[in-house]
Amino acid sequence: MSSSDPKARADLTTGTLYAVRGESDWLYYGQVTAEKNVAFFARRDRTVASPDEILSSPIMAVVSVSRPSIGRALRSGHWKKLGRFALPEVLHQPTLRVQWPPASFKVIVWSGGTRQFETTPDDPAIQDAEVIAAWDAEHHIPQRLTADFGAEAAEWHVGGPVWRERRVREEYARRFPDQPGHRLPQGWVASSAGEQKLR
């Protein structure tokens, strides 16, 4: 990856492809979707791969990344713009997003900017859906990519998809039993999906 670029600005034009420095100096790749999210590919390298190699990789996660933080990451050299390319076919479909208020046992499912239905977080149909949040490109995304890629132990507090966010909330409740804000709501169904190494 190149050194810092003090004049770089975030580009959220559909198809913009970025190389992203993750933990342990792994390079990951993200492409801006039509919904202005960043789709990260299930691929990592020690040196930047070709766009063809990147874009032929499966999608690992579609994440909302804070635009100002992308600009900071570009200026610091943690992200690098690789150009603009056609989206893979799978990214032309809207993704499910889940709005999950704190201390609530009800979630609202969105798709394409439209409210679809209300359900509970243990609903099997939404376990891989992304919980709505704005991730910081430098401070959150490296840990998030480690968790999504799944080859090494991930920090226990990294959420993302519903199944992992359920485990995070359970772990907060276990670690901080005296904190009312971390108590699980009545009717909580313990998670069992998505076994993953944690640190």
Image (tube, rainbow, N blue to C red):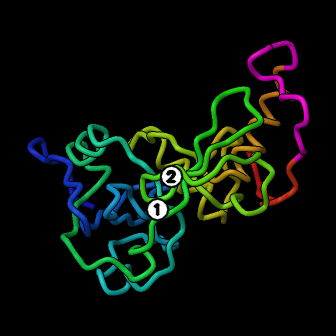
What's the residue type where badge 2 is placed? Glu
Q: Secondary structure at mark 2?
A: helix
Image-based side of 61 in relation to 103, left or right: left
Quadrant where the C terminus sits is: top right
> Is 191 contained in the magenta span?
no
Q: Position of residue 160 (x, y in %)?
A: 60, 49
79 is higher (above) or lower (below) than 43: above
Image-based side of 118 in relation to 7, left or right: right
50 is higher (above) or lower (below) than 13: below
52 is higher (above) or lower (below) than 133: below
Q: Residues within 10 Å of mark 1 (few under 14, many from 20)?
A: some
60 or 3: nearer the viewer: 60
**Distance from the alpha carbon under mark 2 to that under mark 1:** 6 Å
Q: Which residues are magenta?
A: 177-190
Please give the name of the residue rendered at 31% of the width and 39% of the height, measured from the top-left corner: 69
Q: Secondary structure at mark 1?
A: loop
Q: Position of residue 54 (x, y in %)?
A: 38, 79
Q: Kindly indicate whether the residue at mark 1 contacts the one at mark 2 (C-beta within 8 angstroms).
A: yes
Magenta part, dominant SS: loop
Residue 55 has which mark? none
Image-based side of 99 in relation to 44, left or right: right
- Quarter holding residue 48: bottom left
> Is 189 contained in the magenta span?
yes
Q: Which residue is mark 1?
A: 26
Q: Which residue is mark 2?
A: 23
Q: Position of residue 190 (x, y in %)?
A: 90, 45
- Quarter holding residue 49: bottom left
Please give the name of the residue rendered at 58% of the width and 41% of the height, measured from the top-left corner: 99
What's the residue type where badge 1 is placed? Trp
32 or 126: nearer the viewer: 126
